[in-house]
Image (cartoon, coloured by chain):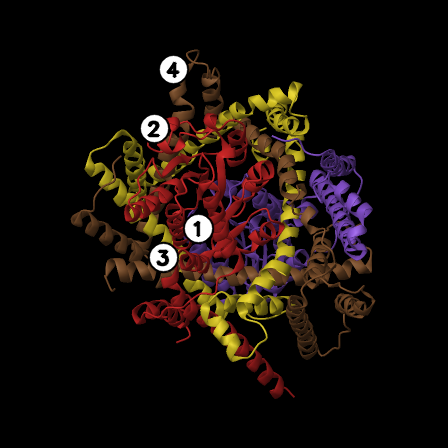
Chain colours: A yellow, B red, C brown, D purple
Amino acid sequence: MRRWVITFFTFVSGLFYILEFVLPGQTGTGQALRAAKPHVGEAIMVIAAFAVGLGVIGVCRHHLRKVMLRQKGWPNSVALLASMFAMATFKIWEKYDPPEVAQRLHDLLFLDMYNQLTVTVFSLLAFYVASAAYRAFRVRTVEAGLMMVTAIVVMLGQIPLGDRFAALLRLPWTFTEARLWIMSVINMAGQRVILLGAYVGGLAFGIRVLLGLNKDTLLEKNP
Amino acid sequence: MRRNQPRWIYLAMGLSVTVPFLARISFQMPISKPVQRTFDQVETLARDNRQRDHKKLALLVADWEPATMAEINPQVIALLHHFMSREIPFAILGFRPTGPSLAQELAEEVARQRGEEYGKTWCNWGYKTQMDTTIQSMLSDFYTVVREDIKGTPIDRVPVMADFRGMEDVGLVAEFTGSSCLLQPWVEFVHAELRTPIVHGCTGVMESPVYPLLSSGQIQGFMGGLSGAAQYEQLVGKPGKGAEGMAAQSLAHLLVIGLILAANIKEGASFLRRRAWRP
Amino acid sequence: METLTADPVWTRAGLLLGAACTLAMFSFLWRENAVYRFFEHIFVGLGMGYTVAITWTNVLKPHWWDKRIWVGASEEVFPFWGLLGIVGLLWYFQLSKNRAWLSRIPIGILMGSGAGLIFRRIYGLFFTRDGQVTQSFLPLLVSVDPAAAVRSWNLALSVSAAGLLAFYAHLLLRRFRRGTDLPAGIEIRLAGGFLLILICSAPLIPRGLVIAWDNSLIVLTLVCVLCYFLFWQEARRNRLATGAATLGKWLLMISFGATFGSTVMARLSLLINRAQYLLEQCLHLE
Amino acid sequence: MTDPPIQVLLLLSILSVFLLVFIFLARRGVPVRLRRIAGLESIDEAVGRATELGRPVLFTTGLEPLNSVTTLAAIAALTRVCRVCAKYETRLIVTLAEADVYTLVKDACQQIYAEEGKPELYREEDIHFLSTMQFSYASGTAGIMQREQVGAAFFFGAFAAESLILSEAGNQIGAIQVAATTSSYQIPFFVASCDYTLIGEELFAASAYLTRDPAQLGSLVGQDLAKFAILLLVTAGSALATLAAVLGPESHWVKAVLAGLLGGAAS
């Protein structure tokens, strides 16, 4: 019964977009569906937006418990909750003509803290690329070898020094050209197949979703 | 030494990106075809706009997040300089929460340098959820999906939007993102339907999946990573963060290549030595 | 919301905070530590708070909340205001133990719309005039400018030669390790045969046409990589198909090598941006 | 909105019919056999090696929560690894980045150990929910790998930038590593640093193979046929295009066929 209810909603919302695609749009039902489309789209946008609170509730539950029970690292949880509420408040306030201080604080939190933190976290990876290059990237198979050679050519092709290097070696092509060629011939075809595989997989998944044939862990956990 | 080996490598990495800044080395980049085509597409829009009564908008799709700011921001700044110097009005829209604010920040910065102002040169449509259905709806009826701008002004009261009827008045989509699959809906829906030209800016990571779309002509051009930004800056004549970083980029690349080669040579040599000693 | 003018006190505070955040995160390279963990929590909190705020101001408020007064008031009637709210609130049954299945309804609606749209998406991406499949109908022979042909030929030949060399190196290596001699697999014969056919057929080609090396390689890659991603046992009965699949895996590896190279650039760019920030904005070394 | 040409609609419905037919055939009990997947067979080998060395095995399911298809496929592989570990009496360590995955995995592992008749070997403290934060999760996993000196490591699921941190840690301690991911831009790093890598869709094939879920198996075969149909289309299309080039400007009929192929789209 539950499965039927869920499949019904899924199927109806899928069918809307399938019919809208398949039926000729100038007359009859097709025309009506096309007229309804912006409103359906708006409704789906709103439904998706409602999910935003779930993450907040999950985080609050987890971290509030940590703070209450004084578990290890609870001051971090306080910081997390405080920064979350501060950011949300100042961002919403921003829309209602806040005093200058509030706006400055918003900029401080968003531009000077959030942005810098994110960029730095990801920049750590540059160090890992370097150390892994030395410690992990061993050519063990012909596949890895092909990959490494291509990678080195591509890397030389994306820096200005690479072309001078090619001129020095008197190669008949520059690395920039070689990179573009690899990218737009072999890489292009390979990626095209990956794209194709993903969409055919998406089609198969979509059909299973519409017919309710996927295993649903949530339903099986609470029968 | 062995335990601290990664730390030595980290140090070498740190030095290889800081030294070029202090030494102030700079390079000219060869312009690659995809970047040149991006530039040409914007020029085409500017030329067409001059012959039209209603100028078409360029739509800057801001789908990047602070994590990829380092690569995307220089690209966007260069493109915004290009838009403003050619008097192309533009709009900003995003399907990632932080995107529209980051784009707004950059637009304000460039506008300050050029003496333009919000509302007359550009409009920010803000953040929306559910990309695929939302783009579909925008194609049918734009004003259902975009009701007010990022500051809460009803969208039809923003001066730059005065002549705007719907997506057919978008002359160019410039999509910037650090995640895969955010470009494709624009191709599948907007380009397939209205044949709107699309240009793209992406991080280096996402560069290789873009080539199929470029070679089929579904997107007209793109710039990838910091080197794409450096090339576009060169084309626009506004050297910025991209060009500045290329020297450091070169040195660090050489370091990585050197490390890969060194590791494999070491491995190969020890392998041969072991073999030679075995009876 | 007016644009603020620069204020030295605030600017300095901002830079100081930014630099502190940057250095705290970099301290992770030494080892994971308390300062790093503290800032990481702040980072997550800020991100979440931002998303909530922007979802409210840009989506829920204009598209849902503001419309409650419009019901029946204007031609843009939106009578489903209440209903939509109820469906949206169903998400929160995920928190209940016994009624969790109700939260499957909004998920189902979203997934269903995605599944329904996949048909239009496949059409738009693959089968329009400049679609991926349509643009794969490439002629293997074209009339081109001779100079360009020679150039692309050079490249194609260098890459194939590099591939062959890599393969023989691989054989040699395996021979060293295992002490056995392995015969060349069907895939190498396939690749060699393909090149040979192309080269030998050159004199047979009508005048004014040349082999389109790039196109041939693209079609070869498409076919071989597609063969690699076939999983049904029956599809692998044929030795030719198996060979094509192995060749496809190699070609795929070249494609991954390209990804590898550009990913290195992406990672380095982030670090370079940090160097710029710390050196120029915080320390004013300019 | 313009209407799609009839040829495209026909093609799409043929592809959908392939999928539907094979899903239903498989659900009816028609056996489906899949090709050999090298990485999958290496599971036994890797666990065996760890057992010989007397070192534990590590498994991790990536960043995405339970509603992602990739994570579900990874959990299917985990059940297999867990079964082999129970058989060989090797210690299994699991690290996770999502709370909902944690509850599911805990129950599943306990059940498998019970099924294999060795419930006493199941240790709840070896299943770690580390953090939803990407880098804490990665550094936590890398730390466990180094402390416990794992002999084999399995990285199955959706990974982002942390792929390198994990596989480098495994490399340092000389573990045999198997990776499987659908994040195509992380595959190169896994290929470079792991012993076996399942590329993209191979993960789903592996999951279908291991769970024997008829809907998944059937749709895999349907997908194969759909891909094969597109392969034929591409071959035919480029043969026609070549023919058009050989025949030169007089080749009207070839051009007409080419144009008709996808409803005027291919001209």
| Subunit ID for the residue under disc 3 | B
Marks 4/1: CA distance?
A: 43 Å
Marks 4 & 1 on one chain:
no
- Three-letter amino acid code at disc 2? Thr
Residue in the foreground of this view, choosing between D17 and B267: D17
Marks 1 & 3 on one chain:
no
Residue in the foreground of this view, choosing between B130 and A217: B130
Name which residue lies at 25% across and 40% down. Answer: C3
Query: To which residue does mark 2 refer?
Result: B153
| Subunit ID for the residue under disc 1 | D
For the residue labelled by badge 4, is the local secondary structure a helix, a strand or a loop? Answer: helix
**Relative to residue A147, is residue C274 drawn left or right?**
left
Viewer-side label of 1, 2: 2
> In the displayed structure, would residue D43 be above or below residue C62?
below
Q: Earlier in the sequence, mark 3 or mark 2?
A: 2
Query: To which residue does mark 3 refer?
Result: B238
Marks 2 & 4 on one chain:
no
Query: To which residue does mark 4 refer?
Result: C69
